[in-house]
Amino acid sequence: MSTWKWRLVSDAGLAARIGIGAAIFAALAAVDLWREGRRATRWREYLFLVVAVGLAMGYGFVNDFVASGISWEYFYYGKGLDGMLGPHVPPDPAALRWAACGVGLRATWSAGLIAGVAVLVANNPRRDRRQLPYWQLLILLPAIFAGAAVVAGIGAGCGANGWLAWTNTDIAAIARDDLFRPRRFMCVYGMNLGGYVGGLIATVAAVIRIRRKRRCD
């Protein structure tokens, strides 16, 4: 694997990318603190984003840890882990599970960053509205990922019953041809799809809540 590809797609490269991003945030926060002193606010924003990304990655790790126990085929064939784990089928369960967790980490860190940015933007300074303190924003983050988990559960049930085959031609083919233990495969597909939909809905709800609370205050 080339150095460039390692940085972009590998699990180890993911850790490096996150470390570099955190270092950049820390440097920018330090500069803002040095320039503004007690009036500095960026460090709070950057810390908030780090927390949002951390929670998202924790969600992704747990989600795919559970999902890989439901359908190893989803990750081995659907996520291309066959190239990483080798031709032996079924693959080693422990190796598959940790590789699947890497998929979860890669898939969710950007979602956490987007959710965190959306919450911060909703709380941007305005002359006619008071900003909410950061502790009130922080307590919204677990609610966002709880919402994602709830809809993921609903999606898993819908997938297992074959109700999501219409959303993807490959999924429809798997169901039609009875491939890869389709009920389990589609359960995990629905679980992941539901997580994204639930996270989006919960993020929009958090933004609306912030805007209403600022207006009421």
Image (tube, rainbow, N blue to C red):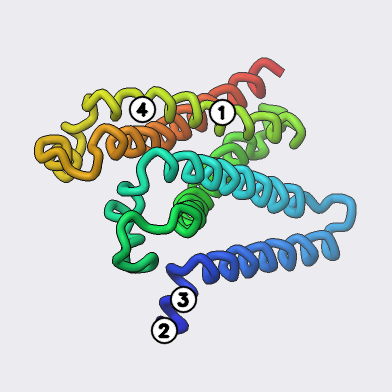
Q: Residue furthest right?
A: 38
Which quadrant does the C terminus fall into? top right
Distance, label 2 to label 1, CA atoms, is 38 Å
Q: Estimate the spatial distance between the alpha carbons at disc 4 and disc 1, rounded to whole Å.
A: 14 Å
In contact (CB < 8 Å): disc 3 and disc 2: yes
Mark 4 is on which residue type? Gly
Q: Is residue 124 left or right of residue 2?
A: right
Label 1 – label 3 distance at C-alpha = 32 Å
Q: Earlier along the polypeptide chain: callout 4 or callout 1?
A: 1
Q: Measured from the top left, where is residue 41 in percent x and y? A: 77, 49
Q: Which residue is mark 3?
A: 6
Q: Secondary structure at mark 2?
A: loop
Q: Residue at x 57, y 48 (%)?
A: 57
**Among the two numbered marks 2 and 1 on one chain, the one whose residue lies closer to the N terminus:** 2
Disc 2 packing (10 Å; few <14; some 14–19; many ≥20): few
The residue pinned by badge 2 equals 2
Q: Amino acid at mark 1?
A: Ala
Q: Quadrant of residue 89?
A: bottom left
Q: Residue at x 36, y 42 (%)?
A: 71
Q: Nearer the viewer, residue 111 or 166?
A: 166
Amino acid of disc 3:
Trp
Q: Secondary structure at mark 3?
A: helix
Residue carrying label 1: 146
- The image quadrant that residue 36 belongs to is bottom right
Q: Is residue 176 left or right of residue 168?
A: left
- Cβ atoms under marks 4 and 1 closer than 8 Å: no
Q: Nearer the viewer, mark 4 or mark 1?
A: 4
On the image, numbered disc 4 is attached to which residue? 155
Q: Residue 63: x, y in percent?
A: 50, 40
| The quadrant where residue 163 appears | top left
- Asked if 217 appears above or below 23 in the picture, the reply is above
| Kind of residue indicated by mark 2 | Ser
